[in-house]
Amino acid sequence: MLNSSSVSLDNLPTCDLHEIEPTALQDLIKAILPTEKAQNMAEFFGMLSDPNRLRILSVLSKRELCVHDLAAVVGMSESAVSHQLRVLRTMRLVSYRKSQRKVYYQLLDHHVLELYRSVSEHLDE
């Protein structure tokens, strides 16, 4: 794997059809996603690969709900929803607030909502 600290322009393969300028190539090398961040992003997207989590996020993109109501809406048991919410909280996708004896869940912030909407719109095109 190439990373900006170990790449020498002299060692890179060249293409006979399209020659890229060394400065443009160096800019591309600097723009490569660092391995650690790529790993974190892969784990994040892997966590989103569960259809039940995505269904929960789809409901929470509309309004906050308690576990009981969320379970009823998505057709899952409360314990299953609680488990999925725990995973979503760990990944910082949802947050909660307590009101007396109830706990209400919502998307953590606008970034999560934008990510959800972008992927949903992309797939609808």
Image (cartoon, rainbow, N blue to C red):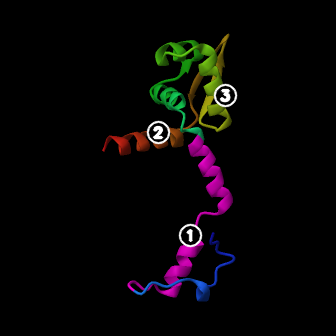
**Disc on res. 116:** 2
The kind of residue tagged 3 is: Arg
Residue 2 image position (x, y, % from top left) = 62, 72
Give me the C-alpha separation between circle 1 and circle 2. 25 Å
Local secondary structure at mark 1:
loop
Tell me if mark 2 has few (under 14), some (14-19) or many (20+) residues whose alpha carbon lies within 10 angstroms of its own: some
The kind of residue tagged 2 is: Tyr
Give me the C-alpha separation between circle 2 and circle 3. 18 Å
- Residue numbers of the magenta segment: 17-46
Residue 66 image position (x, y, % from top left) = 57, 16
Give me the C-alpha separation between circle 1 and circle 3. 34 Å
Name the residue carrying label 1: 31
Magenta stretch mostly in which secondary structure?
helix
Name the residue carrying label 3: 86
Local secondary structure at mark 2:
helix
Q: Nearer the viewer, residue 22 or 2?
A: 2
Q: Residue furthest bottom?
A: 10
Q: Nearer the viewer, residue 11 or 118?
A: 11
The kind of residue tagged 1 is: Ala
Comes first in the chain, label 2 or label 3: 3
Tell me if mark 3 has few (under 14), some (14-19) or many (20+) residues whose alpha carbon lies within 10 angstroms of its own: some
Comes first in the chain, label 1 or label 2: 1
